[in-house]
């Protein structure tokens, strides 16, 4: 009987050891930080910053703009819309660890993946193609896989930052033994495209940061960008006009009309353009009309206000052409979102489909402007 108990005890001990070993092995496999080397994104190539000196690294306006621009504009400038990290890696898997500035992870008309998430693209066959994304949990700091299962070869990657949240810190994770370096340099003399406008420019309501129309345009044209979309606050005030004039882009894209009434368009748009022209007399400018609201084709009562604003913008454009400004371009608004009403989430803010349609309409005009900038 004693021998039987001893044998049974030995069997129990062996089983306990096997279970413990298996659990430890599974825990290591499920741990997203196991055997990952973390690289501070600041040590890679950062694109989308218009000014080098900012309060926090991923802010969109310079530190000296605080107290100069309106509080609402300043707070929105703390969102990292349009910024991206570019790098070269042979990693077979990519992870990200990022700390947000706000606890508001999502919005009523926009998912957390666009508001506070990251978006990964890779250059393949000389085009930027989507590769993966990281959606945040309801926490300030998140560690997520961006993609797995890659072949071990060097590739150029780009990670877009959140559209409606700020970033305190961002790290890219690669497996131990993989390399991650600075990417190939952009062509000599390349200047960014500066986009100024409303929540639509900032990216509401894209499902991912790479699905805004500025991001899609710049991927298609393989250009860098600076996104100065300020949700609900693009009114062409002099303080913002002065900041725009400080930049030296290839093209200015001005799309503020959804935040402006007709009188404001008449008074403020010419001053904004004049301020830019004072510093950049030959830099192409693209003017974009107010979109046709999603339900306007079946509810024409929506149109009178913004149709009047569009007419005023057209007058400003034609006056500048007559005055000898031949580097100004124009995009009409009636077909930016299509004509079937399917391009928005709330009749105002584009869905991914709406942004794709906007990109298709704006792209040929922007191409002409870019050609004129050379």
Image (cartoon, rainbow, N blue to C red):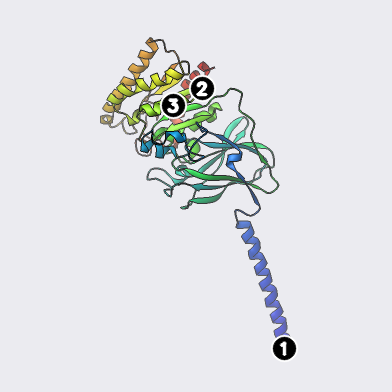
Helix or strand or loop: what does disc 2 sit on? loop
Q: Residue furthest toward the bottom?
A: 1
Figure quadrant of the N terminus: bottom right
Is residue 319 placed above or below 113 in the rendered structure?
above
Which mark, by number, is residue 223? none
Whether pointer 3 and pointer 1 mark residues with C-beta atoms closer than 8 Å, the reply is: no
- Using a 10 Å C-alpha cutoff, classify the residue at mark 3 as few (fewer than 14 neighbours), some (14 to 19) or many (20 or more): many
- Disc 2 or 1, which lies upstream in sequence? 1
Which mark, by number, is residue 244? 3
The spot of residue 373 in percent (x, y) is: 51, 18
211 sits to left or right of 34 = left
- Using a 10 Å C-alpha cutoff, classify the residue at mark 1 as few (fewer than 14 neighbours), some (14 to 19) or many (20 or more): few
Front-lying residue, 139 or 344: 139
18 sits to left or right of 32 = right
Residue for point 65% across, 37% down: 155
Residue for point 48% across, 22% down: 251
| Residue mark closest to the camera, 2 vs 1 | 2
Task: State how far apart marks 3 and 2 are (Cα).
Answer: 13 Å
Residue for point 44% across, 12% down: 326
Figure quadrant of the C terminus: top right
Q: Which residue is mark 1?
A: 2
Whether pointer 3 and pointer 2 mark residues with C-beta atoms closer than 8 Å, the reply is: no
Is residue 36 placed above or below 199 in the rendered structure?
below
Front-lying residue, 230 or 112: 230
Is any atom of residue 174 visible in this view? yes
Q: Quadrant of residue 69?
A: top left
The spot of residue 241 in percent (x, y) is: 40, 26
Task: State how far apart marks 2 and 1 are (Cα).
Answer: 88 Å
Helix or strand or loop: what does disc 3 sit on? helix
Q: Which residue is mark 2?
A: 250
The spot of residue 90 in percent (x, y) is: 68, 41
Is any atom of residue 343 visible in this view? no
């Amino acid at each position: 009987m004693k021998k039987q108990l001893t044998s049974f005890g030995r069997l129990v001990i062996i089983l306990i050891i096997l279970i413990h070993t298996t659990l430890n092995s599974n825990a290591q496999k499920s741990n997203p930080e196991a055997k990952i080397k973390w690289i501070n994104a600041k040590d890679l190539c950062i694109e989308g910053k218009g000014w080098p000196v900012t309060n926090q690294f991923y802010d969109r306006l310079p530190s000296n703009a605080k107290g100069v621009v309106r509080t609402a504009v300043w707070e929105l400038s703390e969102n990292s819309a349009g910024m991206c990290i570019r790098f070269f890696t042979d990693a077979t898997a990519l992870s990200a660890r990022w700390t947000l500035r706000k606890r508001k992870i999502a919005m009523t008309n926009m998912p957390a993946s666009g508001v506070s998430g990251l978006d990964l693209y890779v250059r393949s066959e000389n085009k930027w193609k989507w590769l993966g994304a990281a959606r945040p949990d309801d926490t300030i700091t998140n560690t997520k896989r961006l993609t797995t299962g890659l072949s071990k070869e060097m590739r150029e990657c780009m990670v877009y930052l959140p559209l409606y949240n700020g970033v305190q810190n961002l790290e890219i994770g690669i497996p131990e033994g993989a390399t991650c370096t600075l990417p190939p340099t952009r062509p000599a003399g390349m200047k960014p495209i500066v986009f100024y406008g409303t929540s639509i420019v900032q990216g509401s309501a894209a499902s991912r940061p790479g699905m805004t129309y500025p991001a899609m345009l710049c991927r298609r044209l393989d250009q860098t960008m600076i996104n100065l979309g300020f949700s609900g606050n693009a009114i062409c005030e002099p303080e913002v006009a002065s900041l725009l004039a400080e930049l030296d882009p290839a093209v200015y894209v001005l799309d503020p009309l959804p935040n402006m009434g007709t009188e404001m368009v008449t008074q403020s748009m010419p001053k904004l353009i004049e301020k830019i022209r004072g510093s950049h007399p030959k830099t192409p400018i693209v003017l974009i009309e107010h979109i046709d609201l999603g339900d306007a084709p079946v509810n024409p009562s929506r149109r009178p206000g913004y149709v009047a604003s569009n007419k005023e913008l057209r007058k400003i454009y034609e006056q500048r052409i007559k005055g000898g400004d031949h580097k100004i371009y124009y995009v009409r608004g009636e077909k930016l979102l299509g004509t079937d009403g399917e391009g928005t989430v709330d009749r105002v803010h584009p869905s991914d489909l709406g942004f794709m349609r906007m990109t298709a309409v704006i792209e040929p005009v922007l191409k002409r402007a870019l050609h004129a900038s050379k």
